[in-house]
Amino acid sequence: MSKRLIENLSNGYQQRVGIAQAIIHSPMVVILDEPTVGLDPNQIRPIRELIKEIGKEHSVILSTHILPEVELMCNHVQIIDKGKLVFNGDIDVLKRQRIGNKLLIGFSNLPMVDELLKIKGVIEAELTDNNMMRVRFAEGEAPHEAIVQAAVKSKWGLYQIAPDQTSLEDVFTQLTHQDAAEAAAESPQ
């Protein structure tokens, strides 16, 4: 194996060789650019474990647009958009942004949107593609119990109520498109 050319190795082994080259001189900081791109799931897992192991002794900077990789391997995140830092913080802070003020609710007998809007704190309700209701509530409000009580009273057949968690991709999009939305709002028409 030691006499084989790197180009003849699988992508997974090529990545491992590249990582070995990066750490052979025991640097304080290791920068990895897209270390799992082009790998299949069976190759990605060992690379993730290797990166976590390296992170125990070195600072590792992982440059990637694959957000599940960020979520699985990083404890601190910086998001840069058009050369501007738009987020700098702990991964847990970024994950908490996924849980907002929305609920995904399943009813056997769908109520009218107006009926949900009558519940204290509910400011928006819409039917989703999968025949469920997405309810947005005001900041500081918690209409969960009132929704359950209304569902029982009105026989809506409530079978699910859960926070509607946005994806990390949605949070990323919100952070990186915020400036574009602000610029559009500020520009004279």
Image (cartoon, rainbow, N blue to C red):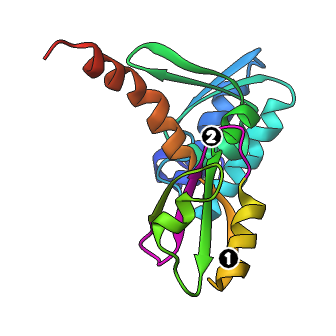
Left or right, 181 with reference to 84: left
Asked where in the image residue 153 lies, by quadrant, the reply is bottom right
Residue 2 place in picture, x, y as percent = 66, 47
Q: Residue furthest left?
A: 189
Residue appearing at x 73%, y 80% in the figure: 152
* Mark 2–mark 1 distance (CA, rounded to whole Å): 59 Å
Residue 172 place in picture, x, y as percent = 50, 36
Is residue 6 at least partly visible in the picture?
Answer: no
The magenta segment is: 127-142
Label 2 secondary element = helix
Label 1 secondary element = helix
Disc number placed over residue 151 in the picture, else none: 1
Contact, mark 2 vs mark 1 (Cβ under 8 Å) = no
Q: Is residue 64 above or below residue 118?
A: above
Q: How many discs mark residues in the rendered view?
A: 2
Is residue 2 at least partly visible in the picture?
Answer: yes
Residue 69 or 43: which is nearer the viewer?
69
Name the amino acid type tagged 2.
Val
Residue appearing at x 86%, y 31% in the figure: 56
> Which residue was labeled with disc 2?
17
Q: Is residue 19 magenta?
A: no
Residue 61 place in picture, x, y as percent = 65, 25
Name the amino acid type tagged 1.
Ala
Q: Mark 2, residues whose alpha carbon is within 10 Å: few (<14), some, or many (≥20)? A: few
The quarter of the rendered structure image containing the N terminus is: bottom right
Disc number placed over residue 172 in the picture, else none: none
Q: Mark 1, residues whose alpha carbon is within 10 Å: few (<14), some, or many (≥20)? A: some
Residue appearing at x 49%, y 29% in the figure: 175
